[in-house]
Amino acid sequence: MEVSILNQFKMNKENARRKNEINLSPFTVRLPR
């Protein structure tokens, strides 16, 4: 389901912000801020 994938992207983006973007995956880097 595309919805679950989008939700994962959102969670990854949130986690990246909480970790101060120390661990960036190729997907989070491509996401607009």
Image (tube, rainbow, N blue to C red):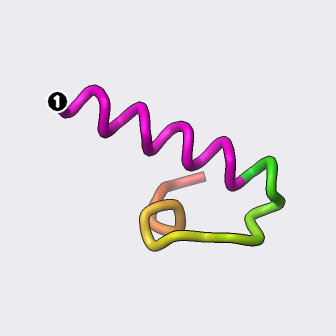
At horizontal 80% and vertical 48% (from top left) the residue drawn is: 18
Please name whichever residue, 9 or 30, is drawn nearer the observer in this view of the structure.
9
Judged by its main secondary structure, the magenta piece is helix
Mark 1 neighbour density, 10 Å: few (under 14) some (14–19) many (20 or more): few
Q: Is residue 27 above or below residue 26?
A: above
Q: Is residue 18 above or below residue 31?
A: above
At horizontal 55% and vertical 48% (from top left) the residue drawn is: 12
In the rendered image, which quarter is residue 8 located in?
top left
**Residue 20 at what x, y percent from top left?**
83, 60
**Residue 17 at what x, y percent from top left?**
75, 51
- Going by the numbered disc 1, the residue's amino acid type is Met
**Residue 31 at what x, y percent from top left?**
48, 56
In this view, the residue farthest toward the left is 1
Quadrant location of the N terminus?
Answer: top left
Q: Is residue 7 above or below residue 17?
A: above
| Number of marks in the rendered image | 1
Magenta residues span 1-16
Kind of element beneath mark 1: loop
Label 1 belongs to which residue?
A: 1
At horizontal 74% and vertical 64% (from top left) the residue drawn is: 21
Q: Is residue 20 magenta?
A: no
At horizontal 68% and vertical 47% (from top left) the residue drawn is: 15
Q: Is residue 6 left or right of residue 11?
A: left
Q: Is residue 2 magenta?
A: yes
